[in-house]
Amino acid sequence: MKTSRSAYKLGKVEEWKSSGLSIGAFAKKNGFSKTGFDYWVKKSRKLNDIKSVSFVELEPAVKPRELIEVSSEHRAPASDQAQIVITFPGGMSVKIYG
């Protein structure tokens, strides 16, 4: 099974964490440039930060006491409507108008 290049480098970051070596020493020992390996260390930290947030509860400022109709049809919102936009890491976003 072929391992993707990014998965390989992220695996090397995990290996570095337990090696006790500095980033520069580990990079040199494994044939990476210090700058390139440092990039993957930072990328790994960002990915771990994203993974640590699994659920964020959102609560409206005013709790509605009526049913809200949900439709998949695109409608332009009124200019004075409140809006919540949730953007996911892949670029997809969900807009909620109220």
Image (spheres, rainbow, N blue to C red):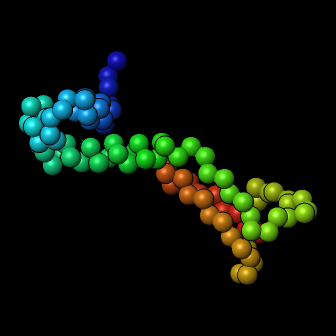
Q: Quadrant of residue 62?
A: bottom right
Residue reaching furthest to the bottom: 80
* Residue 84 at least partly seen: yes
**In the rendered view of the protein, which quadrant contains the N terminus?**
top left
Q: Quadrant of residue 30?
A: top left
Residue 29 shown left or right of residue 63 in the figure: left
Residue reaching furthest to the right: 66
At 66% from the left edge and 62% from the top edge, which residue is drawn? 95
Report x, y in % for residue 55: 61, 46
Report x, y in % for residue 27: 13, 37
* Residue 76 at least partly seen: no
Report x, y in % for residue 90: 49, 50
At 27% from the left edge and 43% from the top edge, which residue is drawn? 41
Residue 36 shown left or right of residue 48 in the figure: left
* Towards the viewer: 83 or 48: 48
Report x, y in % for residue 31: 10, 33
At 29% from the left edge and 48% from the top edge, which residue is drawn? 42
**In the rendered view of the protein, which quadrant contains the C terminus?**
bottom right
At 90% from the left edge and 63% from the top edge, which residue is drawn? 65
Considering only vertical position in the picture, is 34 above or below 78?
Answer: above
